[in-house]
Amino acid sequence: MKKIQILGTGCPKCAKLAENAKAAADALGIEYELEKITNINEIVNFGVMMTPALVVDGEVKVVGKAASVDELKKLIT
C-alpha cells in the first residue's frame, strides 16, 4: 500500500494537489492511504519550505506546485 501525503496549510493549490493525487492513484488502481498534513512543524520536518508538497512513501516528490494528474501518475508508481 502506498502512503501519499499532501503537505500544506489548506490553500487552493494544496486542495488541488490533493484532488489530483487522489485522481492519479484511483486511475492507477493502486491501494493507497491519503493523508493531509497541515501542521507547519511537521511540514518543515520533511525539509519542505514551500507548499504544497507531495510525499510518497516518505520521499518528497513535488514541492511548490499542484502537479497534474498525469505527472502524479508517474511520481506515485
Image (tube, rainbow, N blue to C red):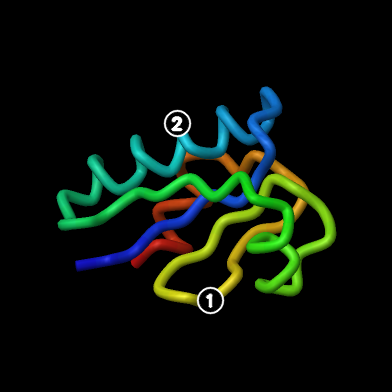
Q: Which of the pair 76/57 is nearer the observer?
A: 57
Q: Are marks 1 and 2 in contact (CB under 8 Å)?
A: no
Question: What x and y, as percent, mark residue 45?
Answer: 69, 73
Secondary structure under tag 2 reads: helix
Find numbered disc 1 in the image and state the secondary structure of the residue it sits on: strand
Mark 1 Cα shell of 10 Å, populated few (<14), some (14-19), many (≥20): few
**Mark nearer the N terminus (1 vs 2):** 2
On the picture, is 34 further left or further right than 19? left
Q: Where does residue 62 sit, x and y in percent of width and height?
A: 64, 59
Q: Residue furthest top?
A: 12
Identity, as a three-letter code, of the amino acid under mark 2:
Glu
Crowdedness near tag 2: few (<14), some (14–19) or many (≥20) residues, C-alpha within 10 Å: some
What residue is at 63 percent from the left and 35 percent from the top? 14
Which residue is rendered at x = 43% and y = 43% of the image? 21
- Relative to 70, 34 lies left or right: left
| Residue 40 circle label | none
* Residue at mark 2: 19
**Quadrant that contains the N terminus:** bottom left
Horizontal and vertical percent for residue 31? 16, 57
The amino acid type, in three-letter code, at marker 1 is Glu
In the rendered image, the residue lying farthest to the right is 49
Residue occupying image coordinates x 34% and y 67%: 77
Residue in the picture at 27% in, 54% down: 33
Position of residue 42 measured from the top left corner of the image (x, y, whole percent) = 64, 63
Q: Which residue is mark 1?
A: 59
Marks 1 and 2, how far apart in space? 19 Å
